């Protein structure tokens, strides 16, 4: 499968901060929605920033359509649509003025398509952005990102703070975007249910490192959570434990192979794991000594 | 500095963001110019009018980095960081040039109405000095506001630049008196210095901007 985005050995350290991005590797094939999950401060936005060149990386390479992305890669950025979790546009502008300016900046800007998106999203063309609600500004940001016909969409927490109805609209639009299998989306969110709905692959970043990057369906199919008591916990082979969390009446144990665990530990309850649970157990849970 | 469609687009956004204040200043210009045409002997009016271009430059500099999300968004658009710096500096200088054009038009109308009495050496020297101060002010504000230590402190950068520019130009003019250099030559030298500082500011701002995280 051809890759639209390839990130290899990405490192970034901030001055006056202990946080650093450590050797991040990531590939986004054509026609795929890649979700990036992780707690706040895990490194999702730093990864996005290094990919988009808003942050200057210390080392590593970022290739878009096989070409290394630098400040001079303006033609590459013509093919990338970006949506942040905040309104990026000056509030004194109207959608119509944005369209006039963007038509000069993006070589593929389509005024008619932009107008169609405004109609689809029921956004007024001549009202100033300062009168828009959060949902409206996010829809406008999406309309702008899509109206220059990008091949790669990079979305940093685009659904944060949106009501369920708007979120649903946004997600269905993103699914439509990858329908032709030639375009891809890199989508960071800590709303894991959104990613479960639309992502094909999930990359989990924790403390600036990629913990896993897997096919979402395989991840949900393979991972499991054993709900057990302390006495049962001691019987579990420590090499099977990815992470565990002691709760008041039980211990939740994350295992990488649910089917094997079901055969091995027949007297224990083993549930399917969802993305949020996997993320929480790995980020907040304890590690068995054998798996550290 | 290249002229290209993206550069025009960025400058268009820069103008749209400041349009209301910009039009307000133009109205103030017209009012001041009208008052001066009516009372040509009031020197304070011509002095104020000639200093107005500084205000237009100020409009474009103020708020330059205040819309942080927009600044970050511009980086992801198909434009280089160099073009972003150029768009800010050119917008500011165009604003200033517009201001000077309006002043020149008023001087011209005034000379038609009242005779050429106001197109004298004093007015022309003051005009050139204000141009030099404006250009230096823009150049220094950009340099100061792009310095990593002054990141996010545009107002401080602005004040520092203003103090420096209003000290340097009259200071050098004063020196001409001490050295015996003719004031015309000194004005020419200061103009060359201002223009060179402006281009040096563009180069150094591009270098600083290239390393900045957003």
Image (cartoon, rainbow, N blue to C red):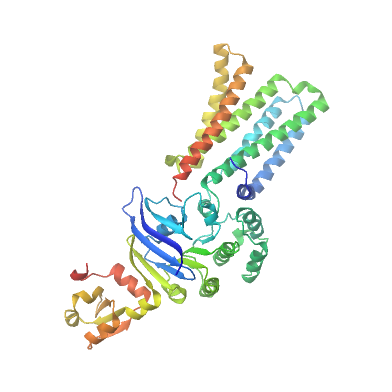
Which residue is found at the position 64% from the left and 17% from the top? B184
In the picture, residue A238 is in which quadrant?
Answer: bottom left
Q: Position of residue B181 (x, y in %)?
A: 58, 13
From this viewpoint, which residue is outermost toward the right?
B113
B68 is higher (above) or lower (below) than A86: above
Q: Is residue B77 left or right of residue A11?
A: right
Residue in the foreground of this view, choosing between A27 and B9: A27
Residue B120, given in percent of the width and then of the height, sits at: 73, 20
Residue nearest the observer in this picture, A103 or A270: A103
Figure label count? 0
Instruction: Identify whether A132 is placed above or below B71.
Output: below
- Above or below, B20 against B115 in this view is below
Q: Residue at x 81, y 25 (%)?
A: B114
Q: Nearer the viewer, residue A160 or B52?
A: A160
Report the quarter where the C terminus of chain A lies: bottom left
Residue A142 showing in the rendered view: yes
Question: Which x, y percent locates residue A78?
Answer: 56, 57
Is residue A160 at least partly visible in the picture? no
> Which image quadrant is residue B179 in?
top right
Q: Position of residue A268 (x, y in %)?
A: 24, 86
Residue projecting furthest to the bottom: A267
Judge from the rendering whether residue A210 lies leftward or rightward of residue B34; answer left or right: left
Up the image or down, A42 lies above or below B99; here it is: below
Picture quadrant of residue A1: bottom left
A253 on left or right of A116: left
């Amino acid at each position: 499968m051809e890759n639209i985005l390839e990130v290899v050995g990405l490192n970034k350290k901030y001055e006056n901060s202990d946080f650093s991005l450590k050797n991040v590797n990531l590939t986004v094939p054509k026609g795929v929605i890649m979700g990036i999950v992780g707690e706040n401060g895990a490194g999702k936005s730093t990864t996005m920033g290094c990919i988009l060149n808003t942050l200057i990386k210390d080392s590593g390479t970022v290739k878009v359509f096989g070409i290394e992305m630098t400040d001079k890669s303006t033609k590459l950025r013509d093919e990338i649509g970006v949506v942040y979790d905040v309104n990026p546009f000056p509030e004194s502008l109207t959608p119509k003025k944005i369209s006039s300016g963007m038509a000069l900046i993006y070589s593929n800007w389509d005024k008619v398509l932009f107008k169609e998106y405004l109609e689809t999203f029921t956004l007024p063309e001549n009202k100033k952005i300062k009168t828009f609600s959060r949902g409206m500004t996010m829809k406008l940001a999406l309309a702008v990102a899509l109206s220059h016909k990008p091949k790669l969409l990079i979305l940093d927490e685009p659904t944060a703070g949106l009501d369920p109805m708007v979120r649903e609209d946004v997600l269905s639009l993103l699914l439509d975007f990858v329908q032709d299998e030639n375009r891809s989306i890199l989508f960071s969110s800590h709303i894991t249910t959104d990613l479960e709905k639309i992502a094909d692959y999930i990359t989990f970043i924790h403390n600036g490192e990629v913990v896993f990057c897997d096919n979402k369906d395989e991840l949900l199919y393979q991972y499991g959570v054993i709900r057990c008591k302390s006495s049962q916990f001691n019987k579990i082979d420590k090499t099977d434990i990815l992470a565990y969390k002691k709760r008041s009446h039980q211990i939740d144990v994350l295992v990488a192979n649910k089917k094997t665990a079901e055969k091995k530990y027949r007297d224990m309850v083993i549930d399917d794991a969802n993305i949020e649970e996997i993320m929480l157990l790995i980020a907040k849970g304890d590690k068995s000594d054998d798996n550290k | 500095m290249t002229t290209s469609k993206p550069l025009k687009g960025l400058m268009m956004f820069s103008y749209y963001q400041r349009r209301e204040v910009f039009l307000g200043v133009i109205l103030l210009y017209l009012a001041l110019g009208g008052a001066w045409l009516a009372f040509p002997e009031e020197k304070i009016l011509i002095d104020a009018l000639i200093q107005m271009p500084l205000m237009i430059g100020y409009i474009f500099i103020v708020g330059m980095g205040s819309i942080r999300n927009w600044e970050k968004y511009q980086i992801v658009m198909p434009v280089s960081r160099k073009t972003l710096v150029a768009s800010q500096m050119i917008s500011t200088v165009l604003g200033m040039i517009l201001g000077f054009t309006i002043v020149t038009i008023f001087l011209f109308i005034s000379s038609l109405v009242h005779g050429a009495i106001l197109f004298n050496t004093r007015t022309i020297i003051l005009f050139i000095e204000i141009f030099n101060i404006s250009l230096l002010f823009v150049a220094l504000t950009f340099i100061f506001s792009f310095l990593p230590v002054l990141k996010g402190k545009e107002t401080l950068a602005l004040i520092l630049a203003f103090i420096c520019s209003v000290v340097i130009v009259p200071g050098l003019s004063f020196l001409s008196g001490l050295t015996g250099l003719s004031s015309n030559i000194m004005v020419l030298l200061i103009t060359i210095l201002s223009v060179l500082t402006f281009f040096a500011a563009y180069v150094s701002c591009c270098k600083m901007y290239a390393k900045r995280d957003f």
